[in-house]
């Protein structure tokens, strides 16, 4: 793998609970990709939704990463401390942003359909101003109309290959600031990745449908578009994405043997051909070159 010291990757967990196998797989993939490219690996705590943050969860995640030998570069960034950056970005968007007075019931009743990620496709009710008696509940960004395919966002994912999405029909005008006052994930992640100089985003495939919206914001804000690699997500016996909501068990190794077990299980899911390691350090010494061989184009999807 060539030396690309300008590579900057990141892992950005939400502190809504402890790390589980699904999130460890995403962390491992991003860590391995950064180290295989001789690049930097950053950690950012995505606690912009402070209402869902669990006290102590972020510290637990950071401690676990250390235990598993995943040392990050630089200081940890916390989204909850960066609100002024998101405000400045929203102001920069100018006329592309408008106030929305619709509540959830109204959106559900009038939606154009359901986006690939499960969110309602907003019909643009407030695009031309708030109706009489309405007050602003959220801020939305205006996406291009379908005419002439102006709304088409396309990119090449290192795993999935070419991906294209029509924002007008598959997303609609999406939220930048929520009714509860918190900045939305789509804006925060775009601002943070650019401000931190992230060149490569490696994360779970459940987020691939959010990528066109993020690329659209990058275009509007004049920001560089990173390279993307979306890896398969871990699922439970019912086929559901493994998450805190679906009963995912926390990773809490009590000794090196258990730490190795967690690492080896995640490596096996990523289809890395590794022999049993004698220590956490030995695991990474074998895993990094194995990943470097795996990601030689094209990426071998699991």
Image: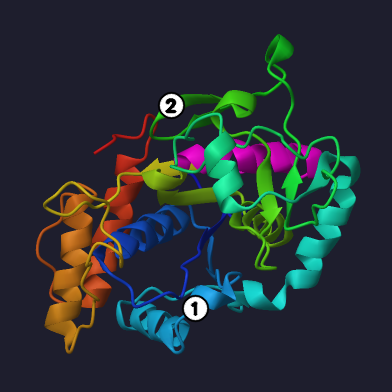
Given the current orientation, which residue lies at the most extreme front position? 133
Dot 1: few (<14), some (14–19), or many (≥20) neighbours within 10 Å?
Answer: some
* Quadrant into which the N terminus falls: top left
Quadrant of the image occupied by residue 212: top right
Q: Secondary structure at mark 1?
A: loop
The image shows residue 124 at horizontal and vertical percentages of: 71, 34
Magenta highlight on residue 123: no
Main SS of residues in magenta: helix
- The residues colored magenta run 208-227
Q: Is residue 79 visible?
A: yes
Q: Is the residue 60 above or below the residue 169 in the image?
A: below
Work out whether mark 1 precedes mark 2 in sequence or the reverse, and give the earlier one. 1
**Which label belongs to residue 161?**
2
User: Which quarter shows the C terminus?
Assistant: top left
Q: Percent from the top left, x then y, of residue 190?
A: 67, 52
Instruction: Identify the residue at image location x=56%, y=73%.
Output: 47
Viewer-closest of 4 and 99: 99
Instruction: Determine the residue positioned at 36% across, 57% down.
Output: 26
260, above or below 9, in the image: below
Secondary structure found at label 2: strand
Specify whether residue 214 is painted magenta.
Answer: yes
- Crowd rating for badge 2 (residues with CA inside 10 Å; few <14, some 14–19, many 20+): few
Query: Which residue is drawn at the image coordinates 41% and 43% (left, top)?
Result: 230
* Residue corresponding to mark 1: 53
Q: Residue furthest top?
A: 148
């Amino acid at each position: 793998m060539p030396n690309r010291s300008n590579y900057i990757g990141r892992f950005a967990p939400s502190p809504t609970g402890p790390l589980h196998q699904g999130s460890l797989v995403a962390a491992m993939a991003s860590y391995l990709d950064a180290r295989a490219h001789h690049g930097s690996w950053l950690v950012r705590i995505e606690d912009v939704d402070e209402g869902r943050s669990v006290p102590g969860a972020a510290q637990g995640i950071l401690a676990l990463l250390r235990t598993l030998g995943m040392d990050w570069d630089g200081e940890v960034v916390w989204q909850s401390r960066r609100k002024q950056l998101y405000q400045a970005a929203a102001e920069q968007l100018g006329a592309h942003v408008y106030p929305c007075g619709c509540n959830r019931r109204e959106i559900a009743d009038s939606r154009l359909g359901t986006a690939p990620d499960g969110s309602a496709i907003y019909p643009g009710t407030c695009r031309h101003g708030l109706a009489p008696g309405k007050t602003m509940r959220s801020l939305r960004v205006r996406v291009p109309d379908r005419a002439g395919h102006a709304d088409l966002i396309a990119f090449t994912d290192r795993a999935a290959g070419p991906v294209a999405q029509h924002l007008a029909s598959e997303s609609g005008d999406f939220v930048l600031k929520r009714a509860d006052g918190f900045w939305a994930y789509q804006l925060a992640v775009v601002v943070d990745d650019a401000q931190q100089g992230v060149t490569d985003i490696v994360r779970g495939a459940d987020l691939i449908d959010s990528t066109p919206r993020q690329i659209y914001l990058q275009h509007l804000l004049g920001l560089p578009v990173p390279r993307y690699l979306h890896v398969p997500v871990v699922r439970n016996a019912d086929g559901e994405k493994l998450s805190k909501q679906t009963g995912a068990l926390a990773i809490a190794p009590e000794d090196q043997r258990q730490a190795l077990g967690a690492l080896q299980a995640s490596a096996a899911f990523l289809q890395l051909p590794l022999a049993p390691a004698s220590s956490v350090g030995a695991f990474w010494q074998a895993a990094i070159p194995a990943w470097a061989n795996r990601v030689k184009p094209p990426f071998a999807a699991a």
